[in-house]
Amino acid sequence: MSGHDPKEDEVRRMLDATPRGRVPPDLLPRALDHGTRALRRARVARRLLWVLLTAAAVAFTVWASAAEPWRTPPTGVTPPFQGW
């Protein structure tokens, strides 16, 4: 029972009938340029973020050493005097 399948013939005709698109000859260099630019942009953004993070850490360290936020603030009033 090796019948001929009409659907297979139809698919073959459809594949043969469609015009195949041509790949532009400069596609590879353009893709390489695009990928190189994307990698360079990502590298620059990563470095910029590290620089900003480092600057923020340095600024916080300087502020913390000058303001000393871990110390309790001085009270505004004197304690009552007892024992006269």
Image (cartoon, helix red, strand yellow):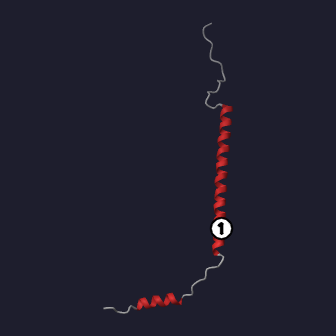
Residue 46 rendering spot, x and y as whole percentages = 63, 54
Q: In which quarter of the image is the N terminus?
A: bottom left
| Residue lying at 61% horizontally and 30% vertically, measured from the top left | 70
Q: Quadrant of the C terminus?
A: top right
Q: Residues within 10 Å of mark 1 (few under 14, many from 20)?
A: few
Horizontal arrangement in the rendering, residue 13 relative to residue 54 (left or right):
left
* Residue underneath mark 1: 34
Residue 4 rendering spot, x and y as whole percentages = 37, 93
Seen as rendered, the residue at the extreme top is 84
SS for dot 1: helix
Q: In this view, does 74 lie above or below 5?
A: above
Q: In this view, does 45 lie above or below 27?
A: above
Horizontal arrangement in the rendering, residue 18 relative to residue 66 (left or right):
left
| Residue lying at 66% horizontally and 72% vertically, measured from the top left | 30
| Residue lying at 61% horizontally and 82% vertically, measured from the top left | 22
Q: In this view, does 40 lie above or below 48?
A: below
Q: Which amino acid does label 1 sit on?
A: His
Residue 42: quarter of image = bottom right
Residue 37 rendering spot, x and y as whole percentages = 67, 64
Q: How many labels does the image show?
A: 1
Query: Toward the viewer: 60 or 37?
Result: 37
Residue 48 rendering spot, x and y as whole percentages = 67, 52
| Residue lying at 65% horizontally and 39% vertically, measured from the top left | 60
